[in-house]
Image (cartoon, rainbow, N blue to C red):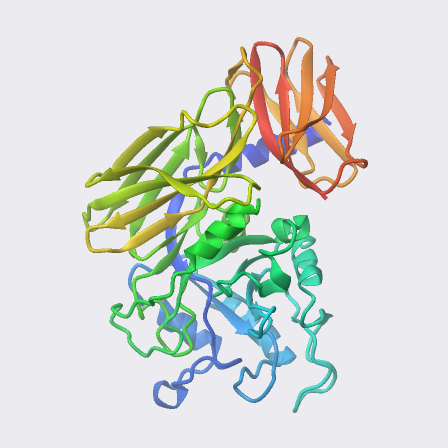
């Protein structure tokens, strides 16, 4: 347990590092699938050339090339297994330390009931085609049936280096095996980190940052949040020509201590990101010390603080606070709006004790650019009379996600109580301890999201737990 404590303290110290803002795009294509359609005039058809071009784009820090994972026919989309390995190598070779290059896939097809998934973190191609022209053997390294989204998301969930998000979903919600119409799926929730705000324009050849897509997928984002999914919101350019970073100023913005693939993956998995039509807008959105993507709790109603900063000096025409009840099925609504201000501070005095709510921010700048944040989830505890102060004692736990046994460590000197609460607010475990290091069996609990609370009668802390 001493070794565990040292590991956990190191993890906390990394998370507490100052976060920077990085701007980029994770949805684009090269000539290894159906991208670089203008290669006859540009001379660029491989990922290496795409990365070189993107490095010269304005306010652009990272590019992910997400090739379609299957072949179908030549250049439609035309991906073969051997090209995937080449793309990974070209991305690694293009990384310089000042610009981040990634290589992944856009998995799936767009027929009714299916849907495309942007996916990173696998060093082998996942697919379903048994044979394609010009390739010996199957067109995959790892098999997953074309319509088996449960299998796909389980593979992502089980890979600690992987993440995925939903690309241009069907607004009716029937994509990905009817994710919206079906019951909440913990495997899906453990794998999917986001859904897109805007996508495209996919086949545009404009390179003066002026052509913005009209699509708005934010209603789908709100639908999944209402179902209980823990996801953030992205912005995609979906380039199929040599326009990387220059078709428009829309950016996926991640918050990380430095620009590395490991830090980007961590930021995406923790939903420390937002979607912005402005290419250098900084959004500081907090509840107490928690930032967007975090799950937290307290015994007082949450105060939402927002600071909008634009490097170009643009003013926020409006800042809106959206909120909903986790897993209720009811769509989020606007709780508060401020006009012509770059700051907002608002306390949700309507939250009911014992409920879990989520909050996200929408900012509209004077020029009409929209910025939408990932949420913060907040549980208002009905554990009255105890002051929550996270700096009064150390509370560490691992592993998380957990399968069968959870280990906890604390420096509390008095007796304390450990409680575990499920996503609906039901208390499923409560026990008193006095030892510094304890273990709790989680074998009998269903897979899902939980809150672990520890209190000594004076101070309290909570942490989010995933049981698999």
Q: Write the residue at 26% across / 36% down.
A: 343
Q: How many marks?
A: 0
Residue 423 location, x and y as percent?
Answer: 63, 36
Residue 50 location, x and y as percent?
Answer: 42, 74
Work out whether 344 lies above or below 218: above
Residue 137 location, x and y as percent?
Answer: 74, 83
Q: Write the residue at 60% across / 68% down.
A: 113
Work out whether 384 lies above or below 274: above
* Residue closer to the observer: 395 or 85: 395
Q: Write the residue at 32% across / 41% down.
A: 320
227 left or right, relative to 239? right
* Residue closer to the observer: 93 or 154: 154
Q: Write the residue at 51% across / 63% down.
A: 172
Q: Is residue 99 visible?
A: no
Image quarter where the N terminus lies is top right
70 left or right, relative to 203? right
* Residue closer to the observer: 99 or 267: 267
Residue 235 location, x and y as percent?
Answer: 41, 59
Q: Is residue 38 visible?
A: yes
Work out whether 413 lies above or below 349: above
Image quarter where the C terminus lies is top right
């Amino acid at each position: 347990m001493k070794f565990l404590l040292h590991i956990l303290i190191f993890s906390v110290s990394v998370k507490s590092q100052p976060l920077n803002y990085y701007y980029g795009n994770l949805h684009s294509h090269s000539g290894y699938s159906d991208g670089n359609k203008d290669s006859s005039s540009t001379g660029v058809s491989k990922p290496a050339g795409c990365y070189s071009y993107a490095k010269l784009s304005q306010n652009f820090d990272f590019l992910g090339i997400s090739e379609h994972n299957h072949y179908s026919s030549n250049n439609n989309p035309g991906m073969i297994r051997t090209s995937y390995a080449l793309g990974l190598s070209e991305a690694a070779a293009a990384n310089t330390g000042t610009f981040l290059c990634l290589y992944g896939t856009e998995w799936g097809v767009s027929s009714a009931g299916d849907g495309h998934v942007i996916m990173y973190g696998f060093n082998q191609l996942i697919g379903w085609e048994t044979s394609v022209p010009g390739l010996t053997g199957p067109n995959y390294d790892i098999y997953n049936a074309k319509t088996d989204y449960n299998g796909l998301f389980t593979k992502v969930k089980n890979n600690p280096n992987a993440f995925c998000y939903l690309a241009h979903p069907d607004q009716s919600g029937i994509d990905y095996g009817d994710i919206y119409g079906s019951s909440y799926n913990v495997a899906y929730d453990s794998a999917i980190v986001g859904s897109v705000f805007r996508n495209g324009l996919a086949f545009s050849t404009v390179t003066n940052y002026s052509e913005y897509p009209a699509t708005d997928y934010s209603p789908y984002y709100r639908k999944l949040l209402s179902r209980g999914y823990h996801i953030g919101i992205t912005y995609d350019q979906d380039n199929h020509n040599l326009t990387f970073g220059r078709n428009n100023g829309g950016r996926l913005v991640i918050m990380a201590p430095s620009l590395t693939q490991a830090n980007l993956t961590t930021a995406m998995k923790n939903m420390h990101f937002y979607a912005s039509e402005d290419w250098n807008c900084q959004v500081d959105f907090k509840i107490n010390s928690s930032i967007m993507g975090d799950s937290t709790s307290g015994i007082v109603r949450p105060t939402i603080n927002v600071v909008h900063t634009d490097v170009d000096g643009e003013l926020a025409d409006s800042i809106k606070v959206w909120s909903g009840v986790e897993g209720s099925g009811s769509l989020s609504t606007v709780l508060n709006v401020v006009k012509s201000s770059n700051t907002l501070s608002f306390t949700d005095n309507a939250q009911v004790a014992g409920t879990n709510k989520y909050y996200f921010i929408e900012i509209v700048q004077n020029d009409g650019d929209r910025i939408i944040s990932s949420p913060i989830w907040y549980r208002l505890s009905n554990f009255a009379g105890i002051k929550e102060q996270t700096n009064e004692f150390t509370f560490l736990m691992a592993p998380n996600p957990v399968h069968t046994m959870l280990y906890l460590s604390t420096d509390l000197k008095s007796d304390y109580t450990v409680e575990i609460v499920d996503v609906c607010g039901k208390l499923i475990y409560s026990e008193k301890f006095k030892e510094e290091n304890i273990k709790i069996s989680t074998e009998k609990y269903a897979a899902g999201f939980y809150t672990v609370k520890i209190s000594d009668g004076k101070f309290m802390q909570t942490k989010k737990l995933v049981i698999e």
